[in-house]
Amino acid sequence: MLNPPAEIWDLHTHLSGVPGRTPDEKMVNLLGFAERMGIAKQVVFMGMEFSYEPTPEKFRQENDEVLQALSHYHDRAFGFVYLNPKFEKESLDEFDRCVVNGPMVGIKLWVAEHCNAASLDPIIARAAAHKALVFQHTWIKITGNLPGESTPMELAELASRHPGAILICGHCGGDWELGIRAIRPHKNIYADLAGGDPTAGFTEMAVRELGVERVLFGSDAGGRSFASQLAKVYGARITDDDKRLILSGNLKRLLTPILEAKGVKV
């Protein structure tokens, strides 16, 4: 552990997998678990039940559930809007509803569409114009990805088309040794440490290859435990100053422009 303790901002949490029958009940439990682990703030995205390829009605429902969960806790949690790029107009409208005219500060993209597809371009451009972060799930499965599931290599293609956007490589592709190398040349892509087992070397390689300023702590709770994911940072052979940047400093820096634009003090 760090002495003094570091402030912790968790990039990657969900309502799904957390006990509770309503968004409010789930949020109370999620915050309670986080508080026990010393996590001060967290980003929440996707609703109570995930949808692989959501219709506009479905992603609006999931975003409404997150908005409800956040409604009493804007001092402790932020939201990213869940979109499906296959529905361009509806996704742009939902971005405006939840981010431009609402409290959310980023976008969550999952497995509906490969992230190098041209259909993402208007969404990413809109995000960049409003200083919103874009979190893209990525994975590299030896058994083969889901039909629309993206890889870090595809995210690298997207980053090259949108150098002004802030993109986050969710899970670093799972196979993080390949994922980190794929995103390394693109300074606007940041590494998410969330999900997967707390294997040795992940955090150290990310810091070595990307620079500590591009590495972000996330847990993927309630799919993963806070403790197992914090272990990736606390147990890493890096300096305490580097750990503090990963645990909160980097995410705080990336979110500051959009939070300040919304009048939120950081």
Image (spheres, helix red, strand yellow):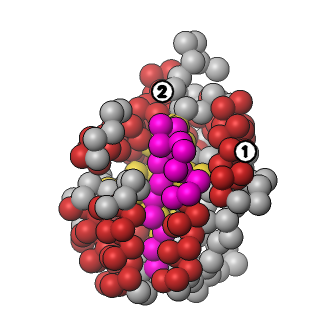
In the displayed structure, 248 sits above or below 140; it is above
Residue 230's x, y, as percent?
64, 36
Badge 1: residue crowd in 10 Å (few <14, some 14–19, many ≥20): some
In the displayed structure, 243 sits above or below 98; it is above
The answer to whether the residue labelled 1 contacts the one labelled 2, judged by CB atoms less than 8 Å apart, is: no
The stretch in magenta equals 67-84
Amino acid residing under circle 2: Arg
Q: Quadrant of the N terminus?
A: top right
Closer to us: 178 or 233: 233
Residue that carries the numbered disc 2 in the rendered image: 244
Query: Could you tell me which residue is drawn at 72 percent across and 44 percent down?
Result: 29
Q: Which mark is residue 29?
A: 1
Q: Quadrant of residue 264?
A: top left
Q: Quadrant of residue 226?
A: top right
In the displayed structure, 141 sits above or below 34; it is below
Q: Quadrant of the C terminus?
A: top left
Badge 2: residue crowd in 10 Å (few <14, some 14–19, many ≥20): many
Residue 91 in view (yes/no): yes
Judge whether residue 69 is colored magenta.
yes
Mark closer to the observer (1, 2)? 1
Helix, strand or loop at label 2? It is helix
Estimate the spatial distance between the alpha carbons at disc 1 and disc 2, rounded to whole Å.
26 Å
Could you tell whether 38 is left or right of 263 in the image? Answer: right
Q: Nearer the N terminus, badge 1 or badge 2? A: 1
Query: Could you tell me which residue is drawn at 56 percent across and 73 percent down?
Result: 61
